[in-house]
Image (spheres, rainbow, N blue to C red):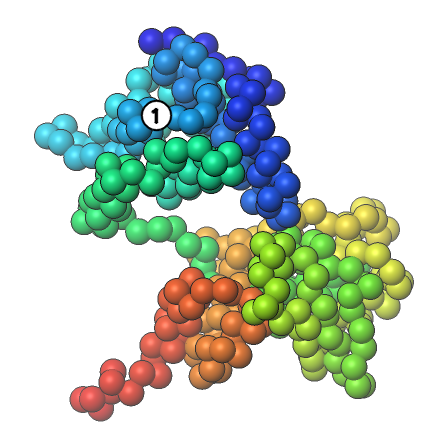
Amino acid sequence: MATHLALPEQLAQQAADAVRELLAEAAAANTTRSYATALRYWAGWHQGRYGVDLSLPVSEAVVIQFLVDHIQRKNKTGLVSELPPALDQALVAAGLKARVGPLKLSTVVQRVAVLSTAHKLKRLTNPCELPSVRTLLSRARRAAVKRGERPTKKTAITRPELEAMLATCDNSLEGLRDRALLCFGFASGGRRRSEIAAADMRDLRKVGDDGYIYRLEYSKTQQAGVKADSTPDKPILGRSAQVLTDWLDAADIREGAIFRRIWKGRVGPALLPGSVASIVKRRARLAELEGDFGAHSLRSGFVTEAGKQGVPLPAVMAMTEHRSVASVIGYFQAGAAEDNPAARLLK
């Protein structure tokens, strides 16, 4: 078995072509990066496993080997998989893997999905849709659930958590920005970190004495080409509007990015998506909140809080722009669980 891996820029030509097609198909930068990362990993694993460059179409046997290498199964000695230790270490050394050890099942599923998309874009026979592959993935999910494994989700920021985080924000430029960012991200429908970072003054208009309408032109839903179900105008009202005004006035922002970096008391260029996540984590830490917080906590928290307050699901989805009820219902039901009348039959 060969363990020499190609650097990311040395992808096999067909895999590189697939990346370019995915770049054209997927307008969302985060999606594009995740697709490219997945295909680089496939190329590195394939070269390390078979000693040759990855080329499309991939055979059924190769996909099955990928799954066997990466999906853990239980035997007498514990959880095992077939990825050779030398190859595992080589993947880490090549920067294609963060650390030695098993990948999360969700990561394996995503990488198979990306390979499947690459085959579809090139109109090639797709091994990822064969019954053998589908069955193996299905059994792997069931086995993981039986072992008690659950998908890891960021802790939701509902109203109490948000209030605690806002209380850590003072009236400095940084405090005003962070307070406005948290309120904007939550009140406008639980915006993703990329959407907060991309927020621009050209899409913000004042309504009445104490409100704004933000036109969300760069949501994941819209970039995916789903316009029919999109409701781009997001109201930002009352208290959330006031703290946004306070930030814009203090930073003297009249055009360009709404949320910006601050360096030595000076307002700089637009925040990056990663910086949005860092701000959320920092404020949660300052508030001494327990949990695993990230930028997605605002999104899940918005839906959960809406469920707690009995907001109808269609109204919630109009704000969040979720396309699928299935993807939002878990958070919504979790928020509404305490108010379920069937839970009070013995009261």
Residue for point 63% across, 44% down: 29
Judging from the image, what secondary structure is the residue with disc 1 in? loop
- Estimate the x, y position of residue 188 in percent, counting from the top left: 63, 70
- Estimate the x, y position of residue 7 in percent, counting from the top left: 55, 17
Among the 4 quarters of the image, the one containing residue 199: bottom right
Amino acid marked by disc 1? Ser
Image quadrant where one finds the N terminus: top left
Image quadrant where one finds the C terminus: bottom left
Closer-to-camera residue (325/341): 325
Whether residue 255 is visible here, answered yes or no, is: yes
Q: Which residue is mark 1?
A: 59
Residue for point 60% across, 44% down: 25
Closer-to-camera residue (161/126): 126
**Relative side of 286 to 203, left or right:** left
Up/down of 179 relative to 77, above or below: below
Up/down of 303 relative to 57, above or below: below
Up/down of 306 relative to 139, above or below: below
Residue that sits furthest to the bottom in the current view: 347
Residue for point 24% across, 36% down: 132
**Relative side of 154 to 82, left or right:** right
- Estimate the x, y position of residue 303 in percent, counting from the top left: 48, 70
Residue for point 43% across, 79% down: 308
- Estimate the x, y position of residue 307 in percent, counting from the top left: 44, 77
Closer-to-camera residue (75/128): 128
Residue that sits furthest to the left in the current view: 76
Up/down of 81 relative to 47, above or below: below
**Relative side of 16 to 249, left or right:** left
